[in-house]
Amino acid sequence: MESSNCNRETGLTRQALALLMFGLLLVGVSIPESLGQSHQQERENVTLEGSHTDMQFLAGRSIHVSADVADDVFAAGRNVTFDGAKAENAIVAGYDVDLRGGTVADMITAASTIRIAGVIEDDLVAAARSMRITSEGAIDSDARLAAETIDMEGGIEGSLRAAARRITDAGEIGGKADFLAERIVIAPSASIAGDLIYRSGTEPEIADGATIGGEIRRVESDMPDLTSVGFTMLRVGLMIALS
């Protein structure tokens, strides 16, 4: 029963992340194209600085946020960088998304490349082609990740659920790790306080020195076929873009 619930929950998480990625990226593409020619030049580079008490909606080719925002930040652009910024929820879509230092409460993001080198005080939900949580990155609660490659070097106080072609864990996880991947690498510096649950055709590569506090157990699961949800992704993405 537990295995069935885990399989269903992981499948839903992956589909939700796939839908989120497609929809947000579609929004990111559609916003600049919908701008008039006279306004597009103004929005090539968007910079947010200073202190703000209300929600911020940002769209442009390159977005740089270094502000202290007491509310949520919504950003869509090719390159989106939070550089020492402070914000509540950050909902971000782009080609490259970079959180450099600073803190956000929650982060939901979709991009081709995501780099987390700041503090997320609650949860992280992210989908990308390539994702890295650096040694400076910290998630104070749970993380839900989907990508082709995931490199985890920082710390997650809660649990990590991740799906990718390759997952490399070299950081600290305060709860359980639930991985679905073709290849799973647990580096010598890795520490997992809870169980290591894996869905893979091959055994995890666990290096000497890695610490796993709970059980290591395999759950039967196939890599998902995203073509089965392609049309649903398109419909949801179009609806979000039109909204």
Image: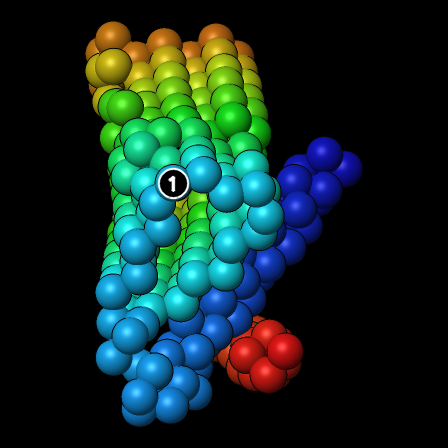
Q: How crowded is the residue under tag 1: few (<14 C-alpha within 10 Å), some, or many (20+)? A: few
Q: Secondary structure at mark 1?
A: loop
Quarter holding residue 38: bottom left
Q: Percent from the top left, x then y, of residue 93?
A: 41, 61
Q: Where residue 167 sits: x, y (%)?
A: 32, 40
* Image coloring type: rainbow
Residue at 38% of width from left, 40% of height from top? 50
Viewed as shown, does residue 80 lie left or right of 213?
Answer: left
Residue receiving disc 1: 50
Residue 72 in the image: state x and y as whole percent: 56, 47
- Total number of numbered discs in the rendering: 1
Residue nearest the viewer, comparing 100 with 3: 100
Q: Is residue 218 above or below residue 181?
A: above
* Residue type (three-letter) at the residue carrying disc 1: Gly
- Residue 214 makes an appearance in the image: yes
The residue closer to the viewer here, 195 or 34, is 34
Side of 195 relative to 49 (left or right): right
